[in-house]
Image (spheres, rainbow, N blue to C red):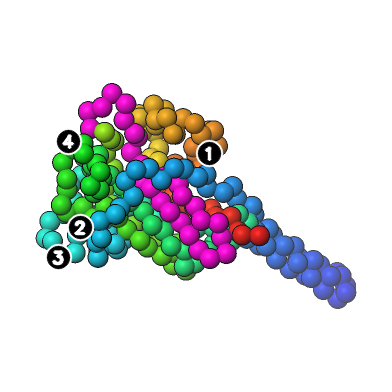
Amino acid sequence: MTTFNRRHFIRNLTLGSLAGLVGIHVQARAITPKEMEGPYYPITPQKDKDADLTQVAGKKGKAKGTIIDIFGQVFDDQGNTIEDVTIDLWQANSFGKYHHPHDNSDAPIDAHFQAWAIIQTKAKGHFRFKTVFPGAYPLNAAQQRTPHIHLKISKRGYHSLLTQMYFPDHPLNQKDGLFRRKTPEEQALMTAKTTEITNQYRYDIVLAKVV
């Protein structure tokens, strides 16, 4: 191979590799579907809103129920990760009770469950929080909402997203009115994925840029 051909080959190989990397980086992703807020967005002030919902600052006890770990990344619709995104999340406790004065169900209150968190994404859009597997509600009702976690996601320059995260293969999913209204593709985007670690889930979020 001549010197010219060798240089030409290396140049094309380098450009092709860079193009492949760029292609991976900007691969389009489907936007996470929206969902209703629900009636129990927290209204009672609380100081502790960190990423560990299994305990409350100043109390020694732990929340009841199965402890789960949820992690993921936030992307834009072109596949780029987004740092410093605010994720506002809340859920029912393991008995299916919300920490909200309007939840008058007979399910017990868990004084050691934080119930509400506001966290920020880190480098490359990573986030993680620890919580308990939410109970279905209302307690003992003929029709119950399938376990889920509410999320409000926001960052300047992107459309805010209000959604709900569901759990894979839960028997109540296909009986839940809101879940069933979604297409199979939308259901997949709103459902967390299991990992090789027990009680650990991955959930990625995709936001749309403001044009």
Q: Quick one: which residue is furthest to the left in this view?
A: 60
Looking at the image, which residue is at 44% across and 67% down? 122
Which mark is first along the chain, 1 or 3?
3
Q: Residue at x 19, y 60 (%)?
A: 56
Please tell me whether mark 4 sits on a helix, a strand or a loop: loop
Which tag is nearer the camera, tag 4 or tag 1? Answer: 4
* Start-end of magenta stretch: 139-164
Amino acid on which disc 3 is placed: Gly
Front disc: 4 or 3: 4
- Relative to 205, does residue 48 appear above or below in the rendering? below
Q: Which residue is mark 3?
A: 58
Q: Which residue is mark 1?
A: 186
Is residue 133 visible in the rendered structure shown here? no
Q: Earlier in the sequence, mark 4 or mark 2?
A: 2
Query: What label sits on residue 55 in the rendered view?
Result: 2
Q: Name which residue type carries label 4.
A: Asp
State yes or no: residue 165 in magenta.
no
Of the two numbered discs 4 and 2 in the rendering, the one whose residue sits closer to the viewer: 4
Which amino acid type is shown beneath numbered disc 1? Glu
Image location (x, y in percent) of residue 99: 24, 49
Amino acid under label 2?
Gln
Membership of 156 in magenta stretch: yes
Disc 4: which residue: 106
Image-based side of 132 in relation to 167, left or right: left
